[in-house]
Amino acid sequence: MTRMFDHLTIAPIVLPLVAGAVLLLLDERRRVAKAAISLASACALVGIAVLLLIQADAAGGTGTISVYRLGDWPAPFAIVLVADRLSATMLLLTSLLASAALMFSLARWQRAGPHFHSLFQFLLMGLNGAFLTGDLFNLFVFFELLLAASYGLALHGTGIARVKAGLHYIAMNLLASLMFLVGVSLIYAVTGTLNMADLAARIPDLPSEYRPLFEAGAAILGTAFLLKAGMWPLCFWLPTTYAAAAAPVASVFAIMTKVGVYVVLRLWLLGFGSHASEAGQAGGEILLYGGIATVVFGAIGTLASQDNARLAAFSVLISSGTILAAIGIGQVGVTGGALYYLVSSTLGIGAFFLLIELIERSREPGADVLAVTREAYGEGDEALPEDDEAGVTIPAAMGMLGFSFLGCALILAGLPPLSGFVAKFALLNAALNPAGAIPGGSPVGPARWLYVTVLMVSGLAALIAMVRAGINIFWIPGEQRLPRIRAIEMIPIVVLLLLCVAQTVQAGPVMRFMNMTAEALHAPAAYRNRVLEPAATAPMQERGTP
Amino acid sequence: MEIVLSLGIAALAGSGMWLVMRPRTFQVILGLSLLSYAVNLFIVAMGRLQGGAAPILAERGVGNPAQYADPLPHALVLTAIVIGFATTALMLVVLLAARGLTGTDHVDGVEREP
């Protein structure tokens, strides 16, 4: 049992790999078998992620960091996988979102093109690998894996819009991958290591003549990650691609920007967070102001977007901008709040992308543009027919859609009572409280005020945009086609929203967990020591040779 | 040798970057290929340039550490070449699809008005 448990860390990579490979062999016509394997793999991933999360949280305090050494080589020389609280949280988030999106796709999207399930599994493999890996080059490999799968998925269902958006998406990401390689090789040239923990240990002792080269490498590497995370001005490809992608794909893409955010969070705090250098401060400011600019751009985008898919895509930008700026502030409390926000906003956006697909089905094509035009020119008001009935009966399906839309709006705008509010409150509270709980402590700097203001205004923008969209969808007069919605499409959305509700109800424990995660991230010594400790004392060695 | 190699990388990267900025999809793909060659050479160069040195061991016993070629960047380059090749092939397919669907090879899918 313990031997099995040791190998749990690599299971999130191996399982989707095997499932995806098996799915490749199956004929496209055996749809039920394919769907069953795919869904079973995704659900098993949820279970594994929960186990890993429990394992990571077992010891309390800094938590347990489980290190998996492939081939049992000592740490700096071979590949390591590291599962700590942050990795386990991201794994769980990925698998939940993926299960929901897969279930949704069973209704119709899986039939829109070949190899949907295989690509989906490979995407999961890449995502899980990127969250687990402990060295930079494997990070690159897993990034390429998930990107290669995502190219296929972004084009799933074809059509001119998807191919055009896909072309830009692929070109941008290929460029980013090349920058990634340049950054990695520069860092290797200077430090002689690619292991993240080893790297963090070597940075303080770097000779000063190598520092500029190292910082250049780190900056190039950072640019590649920020492009994936969608930081302004590197995010112009994002809304078009996300809006054009098929609903379940877009929903699972909501976590892809978070991969960039995750890597920034991990590497930044591991390498630069602990000791303040000049370059470290400059980088923090870039993150802070870049994140704020992203939020502003996203907020303007949500207000300007004429269809719901673009609205959701710009919400992705707001979400990642908020987290990036929070990382830039570099305070334990803010990071904790940002992690809580990350989970809540990703679930909310994932549900929203799925919901949009169902909503669009109930409306005639181009209704969004018409609605905006009507709004701008004031037409259509006179066309209101008087209803004979005292009240219009709302069909159950529309009611469900309405409630779900309301839930998404509350989460994205950060209004009570759902988790978006708790997340924003935690962020604001920590940002306005730089010195901890001491009243009248150190003054709140202008950058923090700017952040707080932008956060509030972005919430307002999201609210306005969502309310406008909601009115256009649910309250338009005239006949509405009743959407044909199957339970299998509605359940994933409800489950994702219920997860947000659970996150709200259990806000105390979840917030404590996030804060402990943030504390561990801000004190990377434990991570470093745990990964680099001699293999002889590590649990991996105790299992003996099979 | 350093000068020759760095000039080569610079020429490849410069022309690659210029091509990537061009409006035709085929130019973009050639640019990306040139850029990836430049990056691959760059990775090798980052492992220190050394002629006539063996990776890890020379003949018997531990070799002379001064005559040591770092094998890791070469392994990285191999991986990067394979991945770059695969993604470029994929991009070519998308390029053809875009050409077929939009009827133009402009990167935005529409010809700019003259």
Image (cartoon, coloured by chain):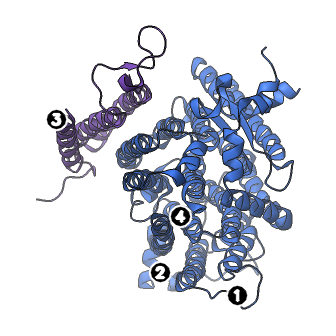
Chain colours: A blue, B purple
Give the Cα distance between marks 4 and 2: 16 Å
**Which of these two is toward me, A486 or A233?**
A233
**Looking at the picture, how far across and down is residue A423, in whole percent?**
71, 70
What residue did someone put label 2 on? A375
The residue sitting at the top extreme is B60
Q: Do the numbered discs 4 and 2 sit on residues whose CB atoms are within 8 Å?
A: no
**Which of these two is toward me, A383 or A533?**
A533
Is any part of residue A161 visible from this angle?
yes
Q: Secondary structure at mark 1?
A: loop
Q: Secondary structure at mark 2?
A: helix
Q: Label 3 is placed on what type of residue?
A: Val
Give the Cα distance between marks 1 and 3: 59 Å
Disc number at residue A441?
1
**Looking at the picture, how far across and down is residue A282, in whole percent?**
45, 68
Q: Is residue A11 above or below residue A214?
A: above
Give the Cα distance between marks 1 and 4: 44 Å
Disc number at residue A308?
4
Q: Is residue A334 above or below residue A219?
A: below
Q: Label 4 is placed on what type of residue?
A: Asn
